[in-house]
Amino acid sequence: MAEARYAPQTAMVKFTMILVGVVLILMMTFGLIMRLNQSGMIEIDPILFYEILTAHGAGMVGTAGLTGAAIMWYFMGRYVPLVGAVYAIFLGLFLLGVVLILGAIFVGGYAGAWTFLYPLPAMSGGLWSGGAAAIFLLGYISIGVGFLLMHLEVGRQLIRAYGGVGGALAWPLIFGKGKPEDAPPASVIAAMASTIFNVLGIVVGAAVLVASIVNLLVPGFAVNALLAKNMIYIFGHIFINAAIYMAVIAVYEIVPEYTGKPWRASRVFAISWSVILLFVVIIYPHHLLQDVAMPAWALVMGQIISYLSGIPLLAVTAFSLLVYLRAGPVKWDLASALLVLGVAGWTVGVVPAVLDGMIMVNRVMHNTQWVPGHFHIYLLLGVVAMGFGFMAWLVRDARTAGFGTLDRLGVGVFLTGGAGFTLMFLISGAMSIPRRWADHAPEWQPQAVIASGFAVLTILGALLIVVLYLRGLTARKRA
Amino acid sequence: MQMTVLAISLVVMALISLVFIGAIRSGGRAQAPGSVERRRLALILAMLAVGIVVTIASLRPWPQAVAMTADTPTINVTGGQWYWEIDNTELPQGVPVIFNAHTEDVTHGFGVMNDVGRLLFQVQVMPGYVNQVQYVFDTPGEYTVVCLEYCGVAHHAMITDFTVVTNQGGDDNG
Ligand SMILES: [Cu+2]
């Protein structure tokens, strides 16, 4: 919407979103298989269950990251001249990583979960070899290096075009030195902030990955388990948040096309993105609230920042979107509906997340199904919805104008399935049902039966939306 | 606790959803734009105020406090792939009990449920550390120990139990 100076690399991004769509459906099917097994309706070997759990976690986090990266790359391509070869290398390293990870899991039998919590990769109880674990971790490193290159290219170009990191983050506006008209576009600020914290997180992740690999090769090389856990959660938390914060760029860039008003970077907007940048880096101890060996101040900080980080989201992105929706008639179609759903889902998902970030609540909710409950809300109904909205927008010229019957069906089924599915996680968590258990006690099975039904709906809705995208890619342009 | 948290979550989530639905239904003719930034500021200040109150109320007393006296019963719990070992399985009712949790191998999660399957507390069990958690069992009966940190392929089978017995004034269980 804001003045676009360059042409984005559309073909590679469209191809990426095909991959995203296909992998999402596959990973959702893995999720369904796990819920069906917990419900007792099917029975699979626990070894296979935990392999699927590992693949589902790594696959979904990776796909969320890929979605965010594709969105950021596409829209930054409007403002700065990005080198296309970097994106090709990023995608190549990503796919190499996927092959390594899938091989490690389904050939090597690695089932140490996507979090590779030290020293589990090296101590499988005889189920997988150190080699399989090492290949899994190498897969992560390949993906991490790809992200690093992609971010460095985006960061380099933004710094050059907007006069340094501070310029791209609109610091002059924050400190009252600039006019809002001169500030960078909203999406540039978001891209700069996401790039900084994701690079930081990936560097920490690379360090703990390398340490874990050395530990696999040289068993005498021990790592402090608490330090490793801190590093893993810094990396994991930042990476998944970067996925969300990059995906929201689609909202900043596309929604104005539907409302006719640009998403202006106000002073509050600029401040909140610099605050997010800080919060995302220091919030991670809220994953360690049951690690009593942690210093108490770190846990208190985790609880407080976990709450505070909801404020910029609610008061800036969600609030502004609501203002846009109320201020002018919105042309509804598949893209705008999914993007609004994405912001709503993200906002709603923050509620159970913030409650879980309280130490006294966490004591009885941590690692119950409450945890997948809250993050499935803002990943499935947040990031995935934003990614789907971006896909629908990419092929808007080839589709019938307006909000057609199939479009409504896709959104309706996906939303019904997703809402029911995530709600069952929250209810199950409140009933103390643990997460990541292959076998569920008989009294826990009905919840998994209901969740499986909603999972089927979610997959059908997602499948329809992906098919509409593929059809849009192959259809001829609307006159 | 859990049901209260669920209820609060559902109410706030429903309210946020209603605000979005209201904005979508408004069809873009709902408001005078002049007061937008004032209302945004009010929202931020209101969230900060709620946050300060809830933070203070929820951290005092410190939820993970462990107060050890000479006669506090102390139980050693050891987790390993894939079993729990508890050195005393008859615990006293009504007095603070301290668990010292160790692991033989990977990280586990020591979680205790009551006889209706409600999770009462948990603590991570980490290599190289002894993690302490304190709890007062108000009701005698059977309690179940589960593992709440994924630890490999028999993670879900790491279950054991202990009993809480009526305390007749003695504290010689430790
Ligand atoms: Cu365990």
Image (cartoon, coloured by chain):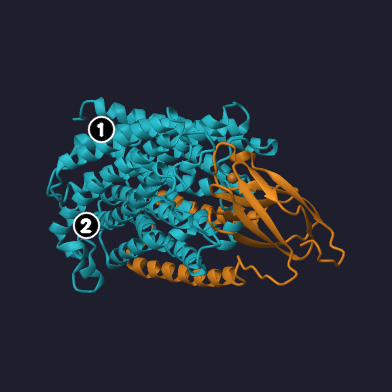
Q: Is residue A120 above or below residue B23?
A: above
Quarter of the picture holding the C terminus of chain B: bottom right
Which chain corresponds to the colour cyan?
A
**Circle 2 — which element?**
loop
* Mark with earlier residue (2, 1): 1
* x and y percentages locating residue B20 in the rendered image: 44, 52
Q: Which numbered marker is on residue A15?
A: 1
Quarter of the picture holding the N terminus of chain B: bottom right
The answer to whether any part of residue A1 appears in the image is no
Which residue is at 62% across, 35% downward? A439
Q: Is residue B63 left or right of residue B19?
A: right
Residue type at tag 2: Pro
Q: Is residue A19 above or below residue A323?
A: above
Which residue is at 73% across, 51% downward? B114
The residue carrying mark 2 is A185
Q: Residues within 10 Å of mark 1 (few under 14, many from 20)?
A: few
